[in-house]
Amino acid sequence: MTTTSAGDRHRGSRLRRLVTRTGPVAALCLAGALTLGAAPAAPAAPAATADPLDRYHHQHLTWKSCLLGPDDETGKELEQAGAQCTDVTVPLDYARPGGRTITVALSRIRATDSAHRIGALVLNSGGPGGPTIGDPPWVRKAMKDVGGRYDVVGVDPRFVGRSTALDCGWPTGSMIRGAGGDRAEFDRMVSFSAGLARRCRAHAGDLVPYASTRNSARDMDVIRAALGERRISYLGYSYGSYLGEVYTTMFPGRTDRVVLDGVIDPARYGPRLLRGTEAAGKHALRGWADWTAAHDEDYGLGRSGDAVLATVEEVQSAAERAPLRVGAYRVDDQVLPTLVFNGLSQDNPSAYGDFAQGVRELRRAAGGDPVSPSPWLAELLQFLLTGHDSAYGSAQTAILCGDGTAPRDPETYWRDLRRADPRDRFFAPVTNDINACAFWGPPRERPTALRADLPALLVNATGDPRTLYSGAETVHRGWPSSRLITLHDADQHVVFGVFGSACVDDAVNAYLASGRLPATDVSCPRIRS
């Protein structure tokens, strides 16, 4: 992630509510795959008449209503914003473009200022596995006046959302859990992870080998051509920053303005990306605890930050003794750290309040009281403990496992867990745990070697608990022509149009309007507009 936590899978609505889940449920754990350095020389372009992708590049797109039915809330929002939708046909396997095909779903709000139209702005809101088709309305709003100069295009990447589906039939929406407190619980996690991998081979083995960021980048270039654009602009959040890094490397010269928000260090990307984020997670937990203590009259979790943290620890201890009953769900000591992790990606009162209410309900359950979960907790438990969002977790895992190799020996993960801080009961047990990628087949391609420079605009908060600020600094150093917008003193994952910083939003929109990067890096205070 970022991979995503339960919250990143519907980023459009999540970001509008300022509540994202980019943790291991949606922000999975990833580890190193892309390296900074000069990209290999591109082969000479084949003659136009020999282009094996010609029929895809020049396909006719039929634009239609985005509304799939009376209960389609995403479709309703797109309709109200004036969007239309279509499907783009792409090869399943780019090595055999004449073979089986799949479809990738798009939405588009056309530019209203046609006299000053800049081009198409293609969006990716993260995951991997997060649908983006519903995002053009809120992104267009965040762009203010410059939005009317772009065709704003949302894309559900291959196997995601309304695109050809990859569904392994899982009993969960995520491969991520905490490791538990002893070897027996870890061994259960090993069996759980191996079972998820087996289900993917059984239910979607014909698609799984073709899930990867490189293939999503290839799809994006087919989309560019099918839209009739020589170059596209791009806005990528979280995992979308990695997709942007890969696309601009594989297809140099085909982008105009590039904004990457919540920047992934490509050297850390892979099935264990979240390793190393523990300190940022603990900092975010402390920030939430201090806010919750200041609102003790609303939540009753403690009148000081330390008291609130002690309450969370007590709930975890209760889950270790026996699973907590929360409505129809049972929350054990492997699930509870995942709930904590997922409660901490957005630094605002709405997200803090949702998480505080969830902890309040978990504490009541720990005391034996009957509990009906609030919407945030109910949605997250449904995501983690049922097959309701199996397709999301399946696609996310297939992409992560297809992009890089995870250690195969369970003992590697057990040793990492034993080396972790024993006082950390909520982050290290999640970020170091085994997952289904340990039982996956090898990737079909090597990771992408990142191009040596790109004049992109990078955005990151200093306290981002998912895509660490150090990752943005690393990419900025590797791309000396880039500029970095820093939001200070915020434990916030992704910023533009989400956090409410006029400083950040105005700087991004000025770049999207003019195509000129700021003369120097931009430093923004925590102040909200």
Image (spheres, helix red, strand yellow):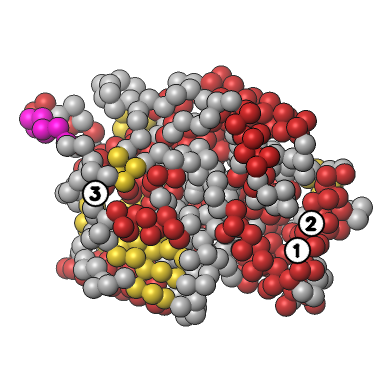
Residue extent of the magenta highlight: 42-48
- Marks 1 and 2: CB-CB under 8 Å? yes
| Amino acid type assigned to the residue bearing label 1 in the image | Leu
Q: State the separation of the CA atoms marked 1 and 3.
A: 44 Å
* Residue 125: % across, % down: 44, 53
- Tag shown at residue 287: none
* Residue 206: % across, % down: 45, 21
Name the quadrant containing residue 14: bottom right
Q: Which residue is mark 1?
A: 309
| Amino acid type assigned to the residue bearing label 2 in the image | Glu
* Residue 466: % across, % down: 52, 54
Q: State the separation of the CA atoms marked 2 and 3.
A: 46 Å
| Residue at 23 percent of width and 41 percent of height | 39
Q: Secondary structure at mark 3?
A: loop
| Amino acid type assigned to the residue bearing label 3 in the image | Ala
At label 1, counting other C-alpha atoms closer than 10 Å, the crowd grade (few under 14, some 14-19, many 20 or more) is some
Name the quadrant containing residue 298: bottom right
Q: Is residue 44 shown in magenta?
A: yes
- Tag shown at residue 452: 3
Q: Is residue 34 shown in magenta?
A: no
| The one of 388 and 207 positioned closer to us in this rendering | 207
Disc nearer the start of the sequence (2/3): 2
**What secondary structure is the magenta-colored segment mainly?**
loop
Q: Which residue is mark 2?
A: 313
